[in-house]
Image: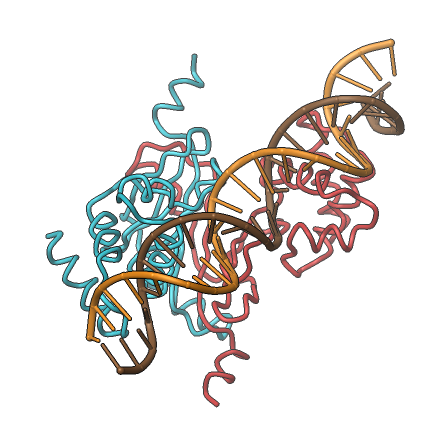
Chain colours: A red, B cyan, C orange, D brown
Amino acid sequence: MENKDLTLVVNTLKEHGYKLTSPRKQIVEYMISTHSHPTAEMIHREVKNLPVSTIYNTLEILIKLHLVIEIDNKNDDKTHYDYFGTPHYHVVCTNCGKIVDAEQFDFSKLPESAEKETGYQVTGVSIEVFGLCPDCQKLKDK
Amino acid sequence: MENKDLTLVVNTLKEHGYKLTSPRKQIVEYMISTHSHPTAEMIHREVKNLPVSTIYNTLEILIKLHLVIEIDNKNDDKTHYDYFGTPHYHVVCTNCGKIVDAEQFDFSKLPESAEKETGYQVTGVSIEVFGLCPDCQKLKDK
DNA sequence: TTGCTTGCAAAAGGTTTGCATTAAG
DNA sequence: CTTAATGCAAACCTTTTGCAAGCAA
């Protein structure tokens, strides 16, 4: 499954004229494998021996190609990143910042609706839901 | 109409124990009146003689009370703010950063869906649609 | 080869913080 | 009165930038 993702990303990079360098491969592999919605700093810590500038450069490309999306958890001041293989949205805890995936809601009509209403030519959608995660709900009860 | 908004905000502030200070009133009035999705710096420029710290402090309160929301236009590195009187979402131009409002899409079932799927106790939703605004579409055609 | 990428360090700049002063309730 | 809020400046820290060196294609 993850090999399929890797192939997709590699092909997409090549198609758009981006070279397949070792740093890029490492970052892509990490992003595909992790489900932790990491920050740039977390990626920098996990993918050894890369400068932060390369992390940011690579993420910028992946975002432009819609392979990775940015998430603002509004808990720390850092941008979180997520490999976006299959469509989903994020639910973020306003107390501890924990981010989980969700998918059982149909946004397929949203782009068309936005285009019709605003005249924008839609290329992407970002959905974030905020609330208290189960753990933080328990803490509040005490 | 805007007086109604002002009353709502003032009452909400009072209900939650926040003092109605002159800086807060100025900022609230500006946020209700403008439709420009301003940054903190723009608010600072328009609402005279207030330090940025007060702008940020006040915005933080208004956000906590769900009276104002944050928007990331991913074009500049600044957070944009918007008075959130009536439910709507934002469509952001990926080329020039222009933000417009839209509302003709039904998100009313989203909170319930997210709660059921994740167990989070939902308190808010953030929707952003990205694309090319009509002006930037024309520029690209040339 | 050759031009994109990397890697390092330094800079930038939006946002936060500390604290003395002021004023709302 | 009392305590929260303001105002100012300095600090913070994530992210960006510049450029010489390296390496895919």
Residue at point 66%, 41% (across, down): A56
User: What is the x, y in percent for residue B92?
Assistant: 40, 38
Residue A79 in sight: no
Q: Is residue C7 left or right of residue B82?
A: right
* A141 is higher (above) or lower (below) than B63: below
Q: Nearer the viewer, residue A122 or A48?
A: A48
Q: Residue at x 45, y 19 (%)?
A: B140
The answer to whether residue B115 is seen in the rendering is yes
Q: Is residue A90 above or below residue A125?
A: below
| Closer to the camera in the image, B116 or B93 | B93
User: Which is more toward the observer, B48 or A44?
Assistant: B48
How far across and how far down the image is residue D16, in percent?
A: 59, 35
Q: Position of residue D20 (x, y in %)?
A: 83, 22
Asked whether, in this view, residue A88 is left or right of residue A40, the answer is: left
Q: Residue B55: give x, y in percent of width and height.
A: 35, 52
**Residue beneath the point at 46% across and 33% down:** B94
Q: Residue furthest bottom?
A: A142
C6 vs C25, left or right, is right
